[in-house]
Image (tube, helix red, strand yellow):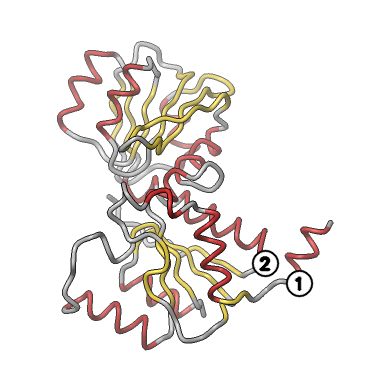
């Protein structure tokens, strides 16, 4: 009852407070050395309060415009604007920054921290959608596990799994497993097709990621493993949606999800 009461009372947060909370909850510092993304607050705002947060996959002009349209003070994304390489403030990059600044819209990005988070991460939310049990870390990237491996409550077909996750456009399926019904699944969202080799080593029935690579085709076929690429975008809506819902539930700040599918 105490948590519910707090959610009803706290509807506006100070900008610094929400950024500090996000940094700690998403464990931003843990990924500084292995993630090229500038995780954390990428664009600040003059206004000291955050009344509404819009969540999206990409920091594109369309998501900026939609965030302003719905009255958001902050846009929280998985793919931000800065990736470790100096970028001249010209062209579309200038337009995005200028638009955000002129509309006092803050931008917060969480790349690997949102992939790997055990509660609201892309991979945790995908695993939740499948009801995976007996989960263990999976998908090593510079010494950090980004994804999860687990067991389905009951064996499912590839088509049933596809429907549970809502994959449609951008879907690639390699049905090379020995059994039609799948029990064990490993997941790493986005562009992680090469992690299928780890799934092969662990004798997993199905590996799920966002994008396919030509070079993994024969490896999957020869090792008799099912492979499913649901689309980079479609596998990475899960984290922003889950994080937005968690923020609204735990902090009482209004959130919404901006869906801008790419079909890729």
For marks 2 and 1, give the CA distance.
Answer: 7 Å
Taking the spot 62% from the left edge, 74% from the top edge, the residue there is 13
Earlier in the chain: of badge 2 and badge 1, it is: 1
168 relative to 61, above or below: above
User: Above or below — where is 88 with respect to 59?
Assistant: below
Q: Quadrant of the N terminus?
A: bottom right
Q: Are marks 2 and 1 in contact (CB under 8 Å)?
A: yes
Residue at 67 percent across and 59 percent down: it is: 250
In front: 218, or 193?
A: 193
Tell whether 86 sits left or right of 188: left
Q: Quadrant of residue 37?
A: bottom left
Above or below, comparing residue 120 to residue 64 in the picture? above
Q: Which mark is residue 252?
A: 2
Percent across and percent down for residue 202 are 38, 17
Judged from this view, the residue extending furthest toward the right is 1
Query: In the rendered view, does 51 fall on the left or right side of 237?
Result: right
At x 37% / y 70%, what residue is drawn? 42
Find disc 1 in the rendering and name its residue. 9
Residue 210 disc label: none
Percent across and percent down for residue 243 are 54, 55
Q: Position of residue 143 (x, y in %)?
A: 35, 35
Name the residue located 28 percent from the left edge and 64 percent from the top edge: 82
**Residue 25 vs residue 65, the one in the foreground:** 25
| Element marked by disc 1 | helix
Extreme top residue here? 178
Q: Quadrant of residue 90?
A: bottom left
Q: Is residue 37 above or below residue 63?
A: above
């Amino acid at each position: 009852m105490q948590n519910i009461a707090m959610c009803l009372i706290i509807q506006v947060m100070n900008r610094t407070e929400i950024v500090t909370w996000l940094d700690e909850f998403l464990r931003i510092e843990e990924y500084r050395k292995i993630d090229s993304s500038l995780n954390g607050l990428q664009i600040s705002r003059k206004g000291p309060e955050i009344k509404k947060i819009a969540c999206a996959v990409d920091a594109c002009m369309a998501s900026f415009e939609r965030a302003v349209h719905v009255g958001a003070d902050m846009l929280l994304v998985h793919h931000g604007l800065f990736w470790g390489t100096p970028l001249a403030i010209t062209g579309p990059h200038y337009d995005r920054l200028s638009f955000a600044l002129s509309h006092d819209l803050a931008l917060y990005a969480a790349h690997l921290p949102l992939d790997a988070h055990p509660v609201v991460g892309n991979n945790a939310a995908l695993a939740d959608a499948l009801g995976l049990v007996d989960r263990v870390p999976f998908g090593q990237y510079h010494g950090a596990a980004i994804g999860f491996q687990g067991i389905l409550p009951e064996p499912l077909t590839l088509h049933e799994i596809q429907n549970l996750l809502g994959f449609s456009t951008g879907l690639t399926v390699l049905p090379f497993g020995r059994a039609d019904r799948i029990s064990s699944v490993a997941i790493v969202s986005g562009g992680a097709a090469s992690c299928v080799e780890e799934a092969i080593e662990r004798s997993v029935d199905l590996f799920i990621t966002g994008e396919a690579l030509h070079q993994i085709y024969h490896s999957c076929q020869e090792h008799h493993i099912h492979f499913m690429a649901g689309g980079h975008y479609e596998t990475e809506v899960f984290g922003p949606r889950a994080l937005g819902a968690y923020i609204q539930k735990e902090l009482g700040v209004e959130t919404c999800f901006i869906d801008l599918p790419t079909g890729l």
